[in-house]
Amino acid sequence: MKPKILLVNPPIYDFSAYDFWLKPYGLLEVAGQLEGQVEMVLFDYLDRIAAETETGHIPREDTWHRGHFPQQRIAKPAAFKDIPRYLYRFGRNRDSFLRFLSDQQPFEFVLIQTVMTYWYLGVQEVIEDVRRIYPKARIVLGGVYATLCPAHAASIGADLVISGSNLSPLFDHLNLEPPSSPNPAWWKGYPGIESAAIKITKGCPFRCTYCSVPLMGEPFSVRSIADCVAEVKRAASTGAEDIAFYDDALLVRAEQGLLPFLETVQSEGLLLNFHTPNALHCRFLSRDIAKRMVSGNVKSFYLGFESASVDWHNQTGRKVTCSELADAVEHLRSAGVDPHNITAYQIIGHPESECQQAEATMEFIHSLGIRIMLADFSPIPGTPDGNRCNRFTDLSEPLNHNKTAFTIRRLSYESVGRLKDRCRQLNGQLPKS
């Protein structure tokens, strides 16, 4: 008899959360490798379609199937007592999971995806509920929190914590053989979805000092185009219309990866919209690539910029210059992209905020006629910039990695409010499309 495995994407405990094409892609990749060897069931707390079925409440969403999660205001733990913001639990009702567990036959294993280190309270909730209903189930954690804070992750009740991208410990734990070739991500675990995700590359060749990707232990590589197309076909078969690229370096070696992928999707007649929420490296966004991305039905473009300060970029990895951002925007606009669909990310709350030129950076982005998105800084343990934050907060408690809390402590509640008000003003001044 095949082992029975429960896959869980936990609820989020945070000050804010939004379904920005947020899917448990890592968990579904692992499930694809297990397919055929085990019996699997998925419970995704962040599945808004399932939440609608349970409550009868139709959540608001935009044209590209982004929307608000169900939320409940909750008491703040002691670590957040100084933060003048309400804390929420985002996702499906806890009772719905308990009913789901009670209606199932016992599971031998439970695989839980972890993402942000400071979201561990949702992981802890899932572990408590599984232990209550199925105390003999073996619980396995994997993902970002499990990799960056393995000792802390082990302390909240899991039987096995998988750090990094090597899945050998998982297959050993399950007493299974790894597949000889990868299967598509397991999107058929959903009865229906509107959006999905894909990674056509793995890892990132760059070493930005604020980024966790180098710590995940996965070298940069381009996946098989055939495997990637099979994956989006599977997602489309469950109803997905919008696909988010989760790549960390989507434009690196684009001639081998992104461009033939888009061309193959078009030739296969798949009617899908693509989006780039993980940010594009501006220096690789040539006029030709911009045209071919638009032809391939990429609809929204998010550009990694972070700061207009040359000094700041010299300290953090020399990711991009102002001229490279301006050139990328010009190429996109020449290709016919609506400026409202071009967004530049800007970090605020960085430990070296003094040289970031936050206001000037916003004004520069605005001068290009595109949207600004402020990204609160999260101190990631093990990164050079995260380690600099030990003087501001106790990083041994993952709740102190929270981007909202850290940025408020670094800049003050009032300063963050002024920056975000100015961002809204500038975005509101863009001409109507």
Image (cartoon, grey):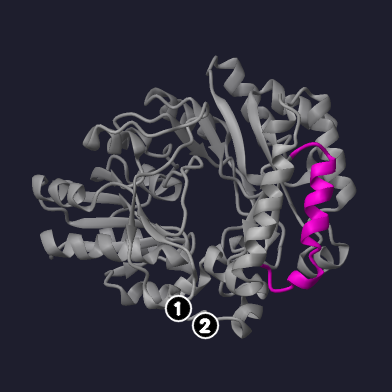
User: Are the residues at dot 2 and dot 1 in contact (C-beta closer than 8 Å)?
Assistant: yes
Q: Give the x, y percent position of residue 215.
A: 58, 67
Q: Residues within 10 Å of mark 2 (few under 14, many from 20)?
A: few
Q: Residue at x 9, y 45 (%)?
A: 103
Percent of width and height locating residue 345? 69, 50
Task: Using residue 74 as the reference point, say whether residue 150 is left or right of it.
Answer: right
Q: Amino acid at mark 1?
A: Glu
**Where is the C terminus found, in terms of image quarters?**
top right
| Element under disc 1 | loop
- Residue nearer the viewer, 264 or 146: 146
Q: Is residue 32 above or below residue 146?
A: above
Q: Which residues are magenta?
A: 349-370
Q: Residue at 74% across / 47% down in the picture?
A: 281
Q: Position of residue 373 (x, y in %)?
A: 66, 48
User: Disc 2 residue type?
Assistant: Asp
20 vs 165, nearest the viewer: 20
Judge left or right: residue 403 versus residue 290: left
Would you name the residue on which mark 2 appears? 394
In the displayed structure, 343 sits above or below 95; it is above
Q: In which quadrant of the rendered view does residue 140 lie?
A: bottom left
- Residue 397: give its label: 1
Residue 345 visible in the shown view: no
Horizontal relation, residue 90 to residue 352: left or right: left
Instruction: Say if the magenta span includes residue 381.
Output: no
